[in-house]
Image (tube, coloured by chain):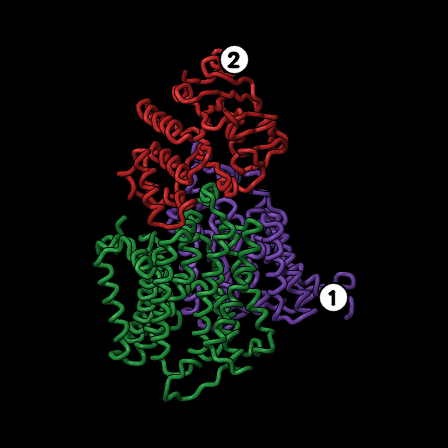
């Protein structure tokens, strides 16, 4: 299997504080990789560098052989990267359907066809009956799903999920896991996810990368990684939901 | 052009600029803490100016004395405005706050128009035309006094924020709204107090300003605009910035009036504003957001 | 193509809404036959504010970019078309193209500077004021159009309406403005139902999220400014040829900008009918107040605006989204999905 996303030695400092230090990871085409680590480990900063919010101080990000680091977020979306935000950013005054339509219009300029696509995506995430509700009135789990739906609607080649399971009940988590697994298996969607809910990480990821103090300290098979003493140590005192 | 003239005009601009600075300081303090842009600021200035006119006309009170009760009155006005009118708008979008204050401004301008009519009013204190020689320079006495007072008031306000308990509490609110709520500060009251303080500044500046220029109700929007220019140039929310901005605008007005046409004086101020907005949007002395 | 367009414009619009709109349009079409010249002049004012408010709404209501300096575009276009007419006898119907171009060029300049340098929110609003003020003072010293002395168009008693040169009786201006308002309404509906409308609203709601969905925010904000300033230019052309006199102090004044945006905000920001409703409510309120106070013998200058300001504040306080959204709900006219 060839690699779709290759992150090679990226670093980022904020006012001298090194948030991410020479982090590398690869996501194979059609694979699901989990990025875990304690709070403040630099996971979201990593995501932001991949998604174009920050330009890495060093290193490179390559999508299917093409350098994308330093590009504007909209161009990174064009390249085929979809993302969600850890702190959700719904278009509050727009309905759920219109939110997803904004995403769908990325590849489909006809609004009627975009609407049908948006409805299909909402349906897939079990949100269809909420389509006419303004996003500002949705509950947090619903907003998280909307965030995923919106990103999915842009038809990304790789989806970056930033803690979309946080705050969900176990049954809701299982539903989300099922949705992503289905997308991955049936449509070959590649996924890179940051997640604290280990239940989801273990169920989804084919490979796990552990970040601690901005550095990658372990990677590999999920079952093996969670037994790695270095990983356990960095989580000590942290509430890891294993 | 004789160098004395240029220097005299420069001095005059500098002195007037300090009074401008005090006016703008009010706007800056309010924005810095309450995060609301007071679009009725200049109108409050004209209210203060008419207050001084009335005090002088009816009871021959010197505007520099009337300044104290006028500032107190404006404090009350600002306090009430924030507590009753603006507070419900704190979490509303900017354009909503702007519209509310624009409506307040319309009411203020036209209430003044109703009461005082459209004609220009002025005060003539007996020292209005006195001047003081400073070496080769000649300065108007009123400008020297008002500039000195403006500096003193600014210093007092600065000390208040740095040293007093209330001042520190207000700075805490400005730094971190949620944090201030969490530690049990009465944010609503502190906001009203701050709005009052900002209004008192503009009240004091207004009382002084009647010594320098005539007043008409229509001056309100022009002052509002000028206060904006000053605080943006100096740095919205920065106290020394307001003073610096005031001085810069005072200087640019005086010098452009001298070298070009007096009617073009605001053009330079606005050009300065545009440049600052583009190249240093946080203002000359503002902190980077 | 035409059928597709038709479908796109009407998709989800309740039949009742169309019916009411049709009735309103018919009423506006026959109104000049029924009202006296004074009322006609007020209706012209209503349409002027409805159209200009719609133009401003594109930028703020749709795309979320607060301009407090739209008097700049009105003024530039008014002066351009008037000067071309007076100096070169160029008919305003052609001069309007120049006026639109100049307004759009200024809009592009301001937009480019602001969006490239990342200026938003309050700072953007103040920048628009600054440019309008700067231009006002500039025109005060612009001898070609007589500076602060004012620029005047030749006026005579018109027996026939010369639409090409915009010389004629008020009723001609009325119908022209009505056509403009209707056209702007349809055009904005078309914009809103297309990709651009969705993208604008996304930018308005959350710029960062919009960008993540592949939207080139700079380009779409520029488009909003360009379309808005171009539309506003036509208000300026109308202004010049209807009032026949232009003073920089008046036309570029910040209070003019504020006057223009009251309608859409009171009516309902971002909605299509909001600017029209707002224009009706505010103009009739202002004139009604004037008439009432005049009738009661209170001819004190300023009193009308005091009431006006109080009404304004009341609407803003109690109807944060304007009058139209709650009214639309009451009338059962919400669009279906």
Measured from the top left, where is residue C218 in percent x and y?
A: 52, 51
Q: Is residue C228 found left or right of B17 in the rendered image?
A: left
Camera sees residue A29:
yes
Measured from the top left, where is residue C308 in percent x and y?
A: 35, 64
The local secondary structure at tag 2 comes to helix
Residue appearing at x 53%, y 52% in the figure: C123
A210 is higher (above) or lower (below) than C331: above
Chain letter of the green region: C
Quadrant of res C192: bottom left
Image disc number at residue A204: none
Pointer 2: residues within 10 angstroms few (<14), some, or many (20+)?
few
Q: CA gap, disc 2 to disc 1?
A: 73 Å
Which residue is identified by label 2?
A233
Query: Tell me, what hue is chain A?
Result: red
B170 is higher (above) or lower (below) than B63: above
* Callout 2: chain: A
2 and 1 marks on the same chain: no
- Foreground mark, 2 or 1? 2
Measured from the top left, where is residue A28 in percent x and y?
A: 50, 26
* Callout 1: chain: B
Query: Tell me, what hue is chain B?
Result: purple
Image disc number at residue B6: 1
Q: Is residue B278 found left or right of B185 in the rendered image?
A: right
Pointer 1: residues within 10 angstroms few (<14), some, or many (20+)?
some
Residue appearing at x 49%, y 50% in the figure: C121
């Amino acid at each position: 299997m060839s690699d779709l996303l290759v992150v090679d030695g990226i670093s980022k400092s904020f006012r001298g504080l090194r948030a991410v230090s020479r982090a590398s990871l690869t996501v194979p085409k059609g694979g699901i990789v989990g990025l875990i680590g304690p709070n403040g480990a630099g996971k979201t900063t990593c995501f932001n560098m991949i998604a174009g919010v920050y330009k890495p101080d060093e290193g490179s990000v390559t999508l299917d052989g093409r350098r994308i680091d330093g590009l504007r977020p909209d161009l990174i979306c064009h390249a085929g990267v979809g993302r969600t935000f850890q702190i959700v950013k719904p278009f509050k005054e727009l309905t759920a359907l219109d939110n997803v339509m904004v995403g769908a219009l990325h590849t489909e300029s006809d609004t009627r066809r975009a609407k049908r696509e948006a409805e299909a995506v909402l349906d897939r995430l079990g949100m269809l009956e909420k389509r006419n509700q303004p996003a500002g009135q949705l509950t947090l789990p619903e907003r998280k799903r909307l965030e995923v739906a919106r990103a999915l609607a842009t038809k990304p080649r790789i989806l970056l999920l930033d803690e979309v399971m946080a705050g969900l009940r176990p049954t809701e988590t299982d539903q989300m896991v099922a949705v992503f697994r289905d997308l991955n298996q049936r449509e070959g969607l590649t996924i890179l996810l940051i997640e604290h809910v280990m239940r989801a990480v273990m169920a989804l990821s084919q490979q796990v990368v552990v970040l601690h103090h901005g550095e990658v300290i372990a990677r590999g098979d999920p079952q093996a990684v969670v037994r790695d003493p270095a990983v356990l140590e960095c989580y000590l005192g942290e509430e890891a939901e294993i | 052009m004789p160098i004395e003239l240029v220097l005299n005009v420069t001095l005059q601009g500098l002195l007037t600029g300090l009074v401008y600075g005090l006016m703008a300081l009010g706007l800056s303090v309010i924005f810095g803490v309450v995060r609301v842009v007071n679009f009725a600021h200049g109108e409050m200035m004209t209210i203060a100016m008419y207050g001084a006119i009335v005090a002088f006309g009816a009871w021959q009170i010197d505007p520099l004395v009337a300044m104290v009760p006028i500032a107190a009155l404006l404090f009350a006005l600002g306090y009430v405005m924030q507590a009753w009118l603006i507070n419900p708008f704190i979490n509303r979008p900017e354009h909503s706050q702007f519209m509310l204050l624009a409506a307040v401004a319309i009411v203020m301008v036209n209430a003044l128009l109703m009461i005082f009519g459209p004609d220009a009013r002025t005060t003539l204190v007996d020292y209005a035309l006195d001047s003081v020689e400073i070496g080769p320079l000649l300065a108007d006495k009123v400008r020297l006094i008002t500039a000195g007072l403006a500096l003193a008031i600014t210093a007092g306000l600065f000390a208040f924020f740095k040293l007093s308990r209330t001042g520190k509490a207000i700075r805490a609110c400005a730094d971190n709204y949620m944090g201030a709520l969490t530690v049990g500060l009465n944010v609503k009251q502190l906001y009203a107090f701050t709005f009052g303080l900002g209004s008192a500044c503009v009240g004091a500046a207004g009382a002084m300003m009647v010594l320098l220029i005539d007043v008409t109700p229509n001056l309100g929007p022009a002052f509002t605009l000028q206060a904006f220019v000053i605080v943006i140039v100096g740095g919205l929310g920065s106290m020394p910035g307001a003073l610096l901005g005031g001085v810069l605008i005072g200087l640019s007005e005086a010098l452009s009036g001298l070298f070009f046409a007096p009617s073009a004086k605001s053009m330079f101020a606005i050009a300065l504003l545009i440049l600052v907005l583009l190249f240093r949007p946080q203002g000359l002395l503002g902190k980077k957001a | 193509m035409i059928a597709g367009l038709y479908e796109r414009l009407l998709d989800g619009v309740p039949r009742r809404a169309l019916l009411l709109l049709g009735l309103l349009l018919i009423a506006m079409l026959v109104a000049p036959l029924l009202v006296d010249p004074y009322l006609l002049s007020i209706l012209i004012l209503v349409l002027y504010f409805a159209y200009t408010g719609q133009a401003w709404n594109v930028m703020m209501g749709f795309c979320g970019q607060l301009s407090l300096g739209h008097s700049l575009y009105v003024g530039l276009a008014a002066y351009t078309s008037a000067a071309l007419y007076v100096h070169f006898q160029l008919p305003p119907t052609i001069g309007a193209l120049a006026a639109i171009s100049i307004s759009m060029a200024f809009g592009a300049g301001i937009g480019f500077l602001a969006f490239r340098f990342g200026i938003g929110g309050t700072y953007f609003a103040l920048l628009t004021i600054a440019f309008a003020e700067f231009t006002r003072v500039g025109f005060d010293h612009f001898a070609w159009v007589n500076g602060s002395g004012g620029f005047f168009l030749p006026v005579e008693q018109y027996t026939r309406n010369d639409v090409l040169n915009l010389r004629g009786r008020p009723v001609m201006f009325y119908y022209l403005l009505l056509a403009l308002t209707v056209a702007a309404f349809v055009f904005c509906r078309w914009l809103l139902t297309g990709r651009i409308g969705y993208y604008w609203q996304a930018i308005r709601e959350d710029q960062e999220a919009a960008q993540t969905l592949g939207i080139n925010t700079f380009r779409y904000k520029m488009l909003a400014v360009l379309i808005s300033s171009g539309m506003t230019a036509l208000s300026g052309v109308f202004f010049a040829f209807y009032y026949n006199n232009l003073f920089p102090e008046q036309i570029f004044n910040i209070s003019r900008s504020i006057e223009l945006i009251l309608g859409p905000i009171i009516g309902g920001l971002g909605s299509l009918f909001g600017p029209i409703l707002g224009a009706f409510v505010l103009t009739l309120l202002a004139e009604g107040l004037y008439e009432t106070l005049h009738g009661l013998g209170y001819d004190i200058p300023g009193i009308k605006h005091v009431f006006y300001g109080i009404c304004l504040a009341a609407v803003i306080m109690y109807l944060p989204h304007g009058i139209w959204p709650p009214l639309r709900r009451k009338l059962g006219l919400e669009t279906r999905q």
